[in-house]
Amino acid sequence: MVMISHVVKSCTTNSNKNHFTGIPVIDLSCPQDAKNLIVNACQDYGFFKVINHGVPPWLVAELENEAIGFFNMSPSEKNKYCPPNPLGYGSNKIGPNGDIGWLEYLLLASNNFPTNSKILSWLATKYVEEVRKLGCEILELMAEGLKIEPRSVLSRMLSDEKADTVFRLNHYPPGLDVDPGPDVGPGPGRNRVRFGEHTDPHLISIGRSNTTSGFQICLADGTWVAVPPDDTSFFVNVDDLLQVMTNGRFRSVKHRVVGDRLKSRVSMIYFGGPPLMEKISPLDSLMEPGEESLYDEFTWFEYKSCTYKTRLSDDRLSLFHKH
Ligand code: GA4
């Protein structure tokens, strides 16, 4: 498949009337309110947006610029960094088991930045460090909101030097015609799915994008809603491990990305995972008397290995449900 990848910086605002207005917004400058609002958001949606997050805007802007520079290189240049095995440059194929998307991406991990650009590697390292700190702050507020101790019971997994981090830069070129995904959404000229529905396997994912819409989440009743883009904020997903550690109180949010006909979408997502050997099971301090674990205990290594044997939309957690 030919990838048309010239990324155009866009400053136009989005006027999509189908945007969902109910996304919880957490203001990190008010921690007393934030801790309870985070818990409610994780229970109701498995998803929320954070503002006043403290990540320097210059860093975000510079990294986005460098990412655009990378995606604007010729296909033969970019293909030097592929296949994503699992790290590196990829286009259209997602994961090792035949999932097809319509995007191009760079998958990077701590100390493993397979790109030609020293500045991109430097910025990505610095960005991941900042967003990891933000992730720790969010997990600490979450522990406070859940009234579990110590405060670091969740955040210690991200601050551990062996924490297993993945960082993803995505570019969704504009257009509809050659998009192989199924149609979604109402009306003629419907958008198509570019990155199919899935939950993220880690603990939490923290993402942001430029002002192009496309990100959608699945609500508890199965309805898909479009998340209004906001390039100044971060969006937080509850991932599979957090669903297990809260014994199902928090929802690992199903999400997907649809395309925009006219505008490029550039997104960057930090996936926060624990050290590979971390044992994952519901937190004792959260269990009510007599409550049973819904899941068999597993290590992150076991779960991660399993995710790479599955298709994107598979329900990986069901493989670990207690029978
Ligand atoms: C989903 C979350 C992250 O983007 C990712 C993805 C990974 C990949 O793109 O290589 C996976 C997908 C993600 C889950 C199932 C497997 C693995 C593609 C796929 C079909 C980097 C991750 O960790 O899991």
Image (cartoon, grey):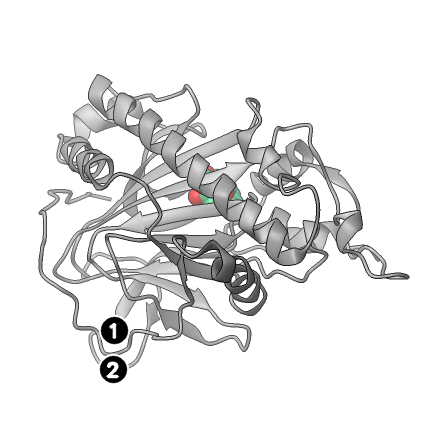
Left or right: 90, with 198 as reference point: left
Left or right: 35, with 269 as reference point: right
User: What's the residue type where badge 1 is placed?
Assistant: Arg
As rendered, which of 124 and 6 lies closer to the eye? 124
The residue that disc 2 covers is 187
* Secondary structure at numbered mark 2: loop
* Residue 119 visible in the current orientation: yes
User: What's the residue type where badge 2 is placed?
Assistant: Gly
- Labels 1 and 2 touching (C-beta < 8 A): yes
Q: Which mark is residue 190?
A: 1
Where is the C terminus found, in terms of image quarters?
bottom right
* Secondary structure at numbered mark 1: loop
Percent across and percent down for residue 221 are: 54, 78
As rendered, which of 183 and 7 lies closer to the eye? 7
Where is the N terminus found, in terms of image quarters?
top left
Percent across and percent down for residue 54 are: 33, 43
